[in-house]
Amino acid sequence: MKYILCADFGSTYSKLTAIDVSARKIIGTSKAYTTIETHILEGFNKALADLESQIGKIGFDKRLAASSAAGGLKMIAIGLVPSLTANAAKMAASSAGAKLIATYSYELSSAESEAIEAAKPDIILLSGGIDGGNKEVILHNAEVISRLSHDVPVIIAGNKSVAEQASRIIADGAGRKPAQLVENVMPRFGELNIMPAKTAIRDLFISRIISAKGLDDAQAIMAAEIIPTPLAVFEACELLSVRGSLTAVDVGGATTDVYSMTDGAPTRPNAIEKGLKEPFAKRSVEGDLGVRYSIPSLVSEATLEAIVQYCGIPEADVSSWLDTVSRDTSIVAERGSVGAAIDDELAASCVGISMSRHAGRLESVYTPMGEMLIQTGKDLGDVSLLIGTGGSIINSPNAEAILTRALASTADPYSLKPRAPRIVIDTSNILTAMGLLSRVDKDAALAIMSQQFGL
Amino acid sequence: MEKTTIVLGVIGADVHAVGNKIIDFAFTNAGYNIINLGVMVSQEEFIEAALESDARAILVSSLYGHGEIDCRGLRAKCDEAGLRNVRIYVGGNLVIGKADPEMVISTFKNMGFDRVYPSSVPIETAIREISEDLGHSVITSN
């Protein structure tokens, strides 16, 4: 096996990466506009022609692909208590590469059921109750789901005592939705078990979603199943973590993803861990943070005042730029323009807020034994590498400055963000391709990434 | 038959861990399914654990003298969270210094605790009484 072609079908671009596996080297990249409405392969063929004009016609031994086309893998996660099974379900969906639209807890209300209906998720993950624990809530929620009018596959990963019953309610209900039963995401109190649900999500993506998203023709010319793009990035980061702990931020037009590959154990001597022990390999996806489609929610979270203050551009100019790019999301700012400076600040806000949400937190408690620190979530303080990826980071000349917003600061000493990682930029946008390559040749993927990031 | 589940923990900013382990051991031996939240447990954590696990009771320990402040409002919060049928028990060194045990018991009962165990009560008594409340038949080792 010598040459591998990796394709990434996005919602606007198809990106190709040609790899010489034996030389452990990327030999060419290209991208072309994707038109999922017309034909997914049009963009692919255009990009391939461009690639061949650079490197000549090559007989690729394997073609591999990931996709985030047609809105990605839209999921809804449901659990019982927000910090427990709902959080576990959220982590399972995120680690499978889903674009999590919403997470719900307790009994679903009719307003929530309408919101689910309107969001049209590709998959619903239903959990609730540890094994032998609460039964009523998951059964109630199964009833609610069974009455949703659109056809959506449901994965049931809750209390084993009633999971089968919940699955029958959904499968035999009026909508006859496909229901798949897997192990509980939290079988015992405080214990995560997200792999079975993650595997089921991937299998469903392959068996149903690819075809529903119009990717059949693309699948037909690939050597292996198409996987969600964030899953490929996740696997690339997981593989690279053998070289040391790391975290990665991917800022996109609609969402911002954060990956951390570290056990997250306390780095402060008097910290006690509380709450759910999060996994070594964690991904979080923020659906309200992005530099184009998510501008209204990003601005409401970051505040316009802060954005204006950080980039030092008059408020009127900032507002008019935000209006312009919200209306036409395809606008790319010219280098060195006012728009580019504002876009940098939008990306930096996404980086800062998403890392604050991803990282754990400390809470100071005064006890008769002195001050104690209670840690919830992962401590990323000692992480050695921070990778920036996604168009708005890698195309900016200020990428490193944008990423420094992910670092720990005295402004919020209780946020456990990375303290002094080495910052690297995924300038050639290789993470997705490396995640795909790792499925067939781990050594080659690790060698290329190590070379790229100077490890 | 499913085991009776009890949520256990030391409330507030209290870090006394030894008694907690002994209670866990004794109740587990008596046939209970114990969910032990350890030390420095907030009221919310007790409630969330009871919700997910369908626990029949919450067993709160306090040894550092601030029990009265830490435990206030737990019953009301349980009721609010839909845990009206979950019994709540408290035990340990509940107030600072030498206090009249009857006074201590009545203070905590007024706060909504079903039973109150000052440090003088042997654990066997607590297990027997709590098992009566919950209709749990104690497994006795030979």
Image (spheres, grey):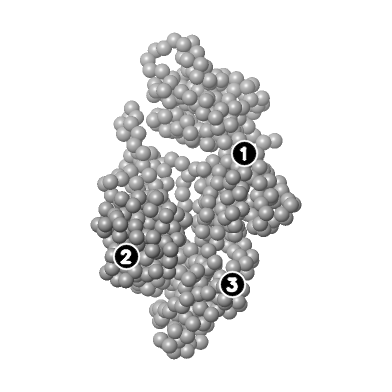
- Label 2's element? helix
User: Circle 1 sits on which residue?
Assistant: A134
Q: Is A173 on the left-hand or right-hand side of A404? A: right
Going by the numbered disc 3, the residue's amino acid type is Leu
User: Circle 3 sits on which residue?
Assistant: A215
Q: Position of residue B131 (x, y in %)?
A: 62, 24
Labels 3 and 1: the sequence-earlier one: 1
Going by the numbered disc 2, the residue's amino acid type is Gly
In the foreground, A42 or B12: A42
Q: CA distance from mark 3 to mark 1?
A: 40 Å
In the foreground, A343 or B11: A343
Tell me the residue at 44%/10% (across/down).
Answer: B100
Going by the numbered disc 1, the residue's amino acid type is Asn
Labels 1 and 2: the sequence-earlier one: 1
User: Circle 2 sits on which residue?
Assistant: A339
Does residue B36 lie above or below A150 as drawn? above
